[in-house]
Image (cartoon, grey):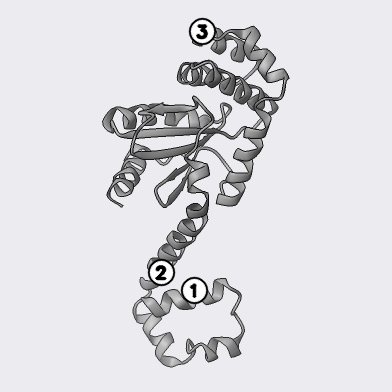
Amino acid sequence: MRWVLTLLLSLGAGFAGAALWDAAGFGGKATRDYLLANPEVLPQAMEELQRRDQQARIAPLRAELETPFPGAVMGNPDGKVTLVEFTDYACTYCRQSLGDVADLIAANPDLRVVVREFPILRPESVDAARMALAAAQQGKYAAFHDAMFRLGPPSADAIEAAAKEAGLDLAKANAAIASGAFDTHLRTNAALANELGISGTPGWIIGDQALNGAVGKQRIGAAIAEARES
């Protein structure tokens, strides 16, 4: 398996020329015969390559990733295991994942969920994300988050209704939004997503793993257990 992984790493680095292939010792009948006889090693090696790539991307960003906008945390704010979610209030799959996150929080008392607003689907998503951060500033993030997904998709009326349901001081929230107080954080979230290769929502980071889409609570739960053990 090690030499197969080395082969794939070499190809990934651009060593596709026949001369380099042979120089690296990957050519010849023995190699071809082994791969034909054991084709299952290639998917296994690709999976390991992907895992290593994820680790390399996440490791230098971990501290920043797991440091939330103040108040934009759900679950146990002092939890030992951190799940990072990139989300957009216009995202149907994010809405579908809301119950999964609630179930995971209930099942894992040590779970801290850092939510990163990643409004990419429509202009109103940006407005909803800004109001969410205003809610976080007022200590009412979770209430707004749940109400916005329930009342969405985001529109001016839905955002205001969610803010009122969460009990926000709207004058204070709108003043903070107008000041541009949250835009730097939103740009940071977009930059982090780009560095991690997250191009859609929901996107999840847990331990050394990056998961994309509504993968379900079983898959996320398994990643939480692995992160806890590492």
Residue closest to the eye, 121 or 37: 121
**Sequence order check: which comes first, mark 3 or mark 2?**
2
Q: In this view of the protein, can residue 120 be seen by the observer?
A: no
Mark 3 → mark 1, Cα distance in angstroms: 54 Å
Q: Residue at x 35, y 37 (%)?
A: 217
Q: Residue at x 43, y 59 (%)?
A: 51
Q: Is residue 128 above or below residue 68?
A: above
Residue 131: % across, % down:
61, 19
Question: Which residue is label 3 attached to?
Answer: 167
Q: In this view of the protein, can residue 57 be seen by the observer?
A: yes
Q: Which mark is residue 8?
A: 1
Q: Residue at x 55, y 10 (%)?
A: 168
Q: Residue at x 33, y 32 (%)?
A: 104
Q: The residue under label 2 is which amino acid type?
A: Ala
Mark 3 → mark 2, Cα distance in angstroms: 51 Å
Q: Nearer the viewer, mark 3 or mark 2?
A: 3
Q: The residue under label 1 is which amino acid type?
A: Leu
Q: The residue under label 3 is which amino acid type?
A: Gly
Q: Secondary structure at mark 2?
A: helix
Residue 148: % across, % down:
53, 18
